Image (spheres, rainbow, N blue to C red):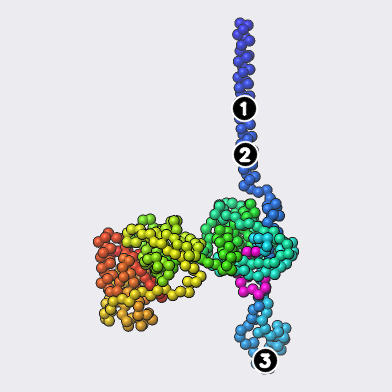
């Protein structure tokens, strides 16, 4: 009995020890989790932006431009002699001076220093047409700047000042690493207030506004007039965007601002610094996106790539590219759409020979093209199509696919102001209830190809329709020209 009475308390003591140790371990684990949560939160939500603002402020500048403008191009207002308003107008004109006298106009913007020897980045629209550009630094120092080069396509300008001492500057970061939800801060000269900081997050990526080379970061950090050309920083103090535009019904910030991505800006700045101008690659084709109906009409899966609508004289023609080809790969990278191809070609070195994979007649072919320079070719006139066979003088008409088409004769060429090399079928009428009307076809458009083959007579179009049906196609691809501009349209076969 005695030994049993002693054993029971020992067992109970051990059990209590197990419970206490387990409880302690649980509490310790919860404490560690709470600490980790606090640390993680402290890393993602800054307690203050003050240290970062102190770090970057010396490299951000205010920009003031001065431009000479004409007050009025027309004659000064005249009032009849003896009019009761004669004295009023005379006094007004005396106060205003000569109405045709040129005057000075000022504008404000922002920018940032990218090198200690005085290179400064801003927007092209901030300094465009300016006679004088003054840079104000955070310290209060002012220096005159000269324009090194500009690029209207990306709205970027590179300026240069001549400082007596090395300037504080900021580095560019990799905009491709920016994620939606990341913290960013903008700094600049909003509404002339000077050296103002605002914070927000990345709201969206890869926004396109209107330009061919657009790649904007959207942010809700407050951006107003005067912020143009200023930097958008990540939390490492690196510039990931140049503040360029806002979306606003009243001209003020409503939390939708756009900054040109740094990975676009750096390429432009490097070329402006080296050449004083941009030198973009040029392929020499007109292209459009591949829509699902177009892809079905040519047997391409999936619906992506850039559809070639015209090949004027240039690098692409020299490489053997043809109208109707679909560019699906450029320099080893897949082509998703027109925008992606244009940016990729523009960023490729002028004179470089690259491989392109095209989809043609149901199979792929590889072409080698040596890129030209876009800036030199932008004014080039597209090559004219070869002279067609003689057409009958009497127009032949037919109704097909919601269209009334007729042969393009010499008389019609004259009436429509076309040159003698133009060939195809003229659309005389479009049924307003048809798919063709919905897709934008109108009277006066010219069908030059059907099923990626030239058409010169109504029977050619009828043959292409029949061939497509026999091949099991659901639609037929037409190449349409309007005012000389080509585009492909796929129409469903009835």
Sequence-wise, the earlier of marks 2 and 3 is 2
Label 1 vs label 3, nearer the camera: 1
Secondary structure of the residue carrying tag 3 is: loop
Q: Nearer the viewer, residue 20 or 202?
A: 202
Badge 3 is on which residue? 83
Residue at image location 53% in from the left, 56% down from the top: 205
As measured in the structure, the alpha-carbon distance from the residue carrying label 2 to the one carrying label 3 is: 85 Å
**Mark 3: few/some/many CA within 10 Å (<14, 14-19, 20+):** few
Badge 2 is on which residue? 36
The label number, if any, that marks residue 59 in the structure image: none
**Which quadrant of the figure has residue 359?**
bottom left
Q: Where's residue 306, x and y in %? A: 41, 62
Q: Nearer the viewer, residue 54 or 99?
A: 54
**Range of magenta residues:** 119-133
Image height check: is 69 above or below 307? below
Location of the C terminus (image quadrant): bottom left
Q: Is residue 121 covered in magenta? A: yes
**Which quadrant of the figure has residue 447?**
bottom left
Proximity of marks 1 and 3: CB atoms separated by less than 8 Å: no
Q: Nearer the viewer, residue 289 or 148?
A: 148
Q: Where's residue 70, x and y in %? A: 64, 81
Q: Where's residue 84, x and y in %? A: 69, 90
Sequence-wise, the earlier of marks 1 and 3 is 1
Secondary structure of the residue carrying tag 1 is: helix
Residue at image location 64% in from the left, 87% down from the top: 76
Badge 1 is on which residue? 23
As measured in the structure, the alpha-carbon distance from the residue carrying label 1 to the one carrying label 3 is: 101 Å
**Mark 2: few/some/many CA within 10 Å (<14, 14-19, 20+):** few
């Amino acid at each position: 009995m005695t030994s049993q009475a002693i054993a029971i308390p020992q067992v109970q003591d051990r059990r209590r020890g197990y419970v206490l140790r387990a409880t302690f371990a649980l509490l310790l684990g919860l404490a560690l989790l709470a600490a980790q949560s606090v640390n993680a939160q402290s890393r993602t939500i800054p307690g203050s932006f003050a240290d970062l603002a102190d770090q970057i402020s010396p490299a951000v500048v205010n920009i003031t431009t001065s431009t000479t403008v004409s007050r009025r191009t027309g004659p000064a207002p005249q009032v009849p002699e003896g009019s009761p308003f004669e004295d009023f107008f005379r006094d007004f004109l005396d106060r205003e001076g000569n109405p045709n006298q040129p005057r000075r106009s000022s504008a404000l913007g922002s920018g940032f220093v990218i090198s200690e020897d005085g290179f400064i980045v801003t927007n092209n629209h901030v300094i465009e047409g300016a006679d004088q550009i003054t840079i104000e630094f955070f310290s209060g120092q002012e220096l005159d700047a000269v324009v090194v080069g500009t690029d209207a396509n990306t709205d970027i300008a590179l300026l240069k000042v001549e400082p007596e001492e090395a300037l504080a500057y900021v580095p560019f970061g990799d905009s491709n690493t920016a994620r939606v939800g990341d913290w960013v801060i903008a700094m600049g000269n909003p509404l002339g207030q000077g050296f103002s900081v605002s914070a927000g997050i990345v709201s969206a990526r890869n926004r396109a506004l209107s330009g061919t080379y657009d790649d904007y970061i959207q942010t809700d950090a407050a951006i107003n007039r005067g912020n143009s050309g200023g930097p958008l920083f990540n939390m490492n103090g690196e510039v990931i965007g140049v503040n360029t535009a806002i979306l606003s019904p009243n001209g003020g910030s409503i939390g939708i601002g756009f900054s040109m991505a740094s990975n676009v800006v750096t390429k432009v700045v490097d070329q402006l610094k080296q050449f004083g101008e941009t030198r973009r690659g040029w392929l020499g084709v007109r292209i459009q996106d591949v829509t699902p109906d177009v892809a079905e009409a040519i047997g391409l899966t999936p619906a992506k790539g850039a559809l070639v609508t015209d090949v004027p004289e240039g690098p692409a023609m020299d490489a053997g590219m043809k109208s109707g080809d679909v560019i699906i790969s450029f320099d080893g990278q897949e082509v998703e759409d027109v925008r992606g191809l244009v940016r990729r070609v523009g960023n490729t070195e002028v004179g470089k020979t690259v491989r392109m994979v095209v989809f043609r007649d149901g199979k792929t072919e590889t072409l080698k093209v040596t890129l030209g320079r876009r800036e030199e070719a932008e004014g080039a006139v597209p090559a004219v199509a070869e002279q067609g066979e003689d057409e009958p003088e009497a127009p032949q008409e037919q109704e097909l696919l919601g269209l009334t088409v007729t042969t393009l004769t010499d008389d019609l060429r004259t009436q429509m102001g076309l040159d003698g090399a133009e060939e195809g079928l003229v659309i005389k009428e479009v049924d307003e209830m048809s798919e063709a009307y919905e897709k934008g076809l109108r009277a006066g458009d010219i069908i030059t190809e059907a099923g990626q083959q030239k058409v010169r007579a109504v029977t050619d179009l009828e043959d292409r329709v029949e061939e497509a049906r026999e091949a099991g196609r659901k639609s037929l691809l037409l190449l349409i020209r309007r005012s000389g501009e080509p585009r492909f349209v796929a129409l469903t076969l009835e």
